[in-house]
Image (cartoon, grey):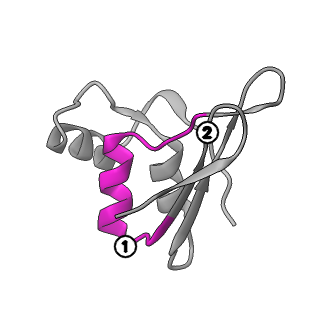
Amino acid sequence: MVSTTNVEGKTHPRQSELAGRVGQPYRRSLHAELRALLKARVEVDTLVVGRVNSRNELCLSKPCPVCQLALLEAGITDVYYSIDGGGWESLGP
């Protein structure tokens, strides 16, 4: 299991390349999803992305288009993310 967060102000060549490909070059800051892929020491097929607010409640953490492309190209088959008000949804076909 790998646990990461977004890192504002830090970039990675892969993040920048993917951001350009999806037409969102401003999304150069290193996102948690790509950090997890870069840190993983084994093949990954499931990713769970969660976010909590200041009241410790689940809120929306749906991967952005840049991260969705990274996950697709990495072959991640199951992606789950938290939604506002609690609960989880899946990125699906």
Circles 2, 1 touching at the beta carbon (< 8 Å): no
Most foreground residue, 23 or 15: 23
Q: Amino acid at mark 1?
A: Gly
- Measured as percent of width and height from the top left, residue 29 is found at 41, 31
Assess whether residue 51 is covered by the magenta stretch.
Answer: no
* Image quadrant occupied by the N terminus: bottom right
Q: Amino acid at mark 2?
A: Ile
Task: Name the one closer to the observer, 26 or 72.
Answer: 72
Of mark 2 and mark 1, the one earlier in the sequence is: 1
Q: Locate residue 50 relative to residue 89 in the image: left or right.
A: right
> Residue at 70% of width from left, 46% of height from top?
87
State the image quarter where residue 42 is shown: bottom right
Name the residue: 36% across, 68% down: 74
Which of the 4 image quadrants contains residue 39?
bottom right
Q: Which label belongs to residue 83?
A: 2
Q: Is residue 66 magenta?
A: yes
Q: Position of residue 25 (x, y in %)?
A: 22, 29
Magenta highlight range = 60-78
Q: Which residue is situated farthest in the right direction here?
A: 55
Question: For residue 75, which numbered disc appears in the image?
Answer: 1
x, y percent for residue 26: 28, 24
Secondary structure at badge 1 equals loop
**SS for callout 2:** loop
Name the outermost residue toward the bottom. 43
Residue density around tag 1, few if under 14, some if 14–19, many if 20 or more, within 10 Å: few
Task: Please indicate whether residue 39 sits to the left or right of residue 1 in the image.
Answer: left
Is the C terminus in the top left, top right, bottom left or bottom right quadrant?
bottom left
The image shows residue 49, relative to residue 38, as above or below, that is above
Pick the residue in front: 51 or 84: 84
Q: Is residue 83 left or right of residue 28?
A: right
Mark 2 burial class by Cα count in 10 Å: few <14, some 14-19, many 20+ = some
Which residue does the image show at 23% across and 31% down from the upper left? 24
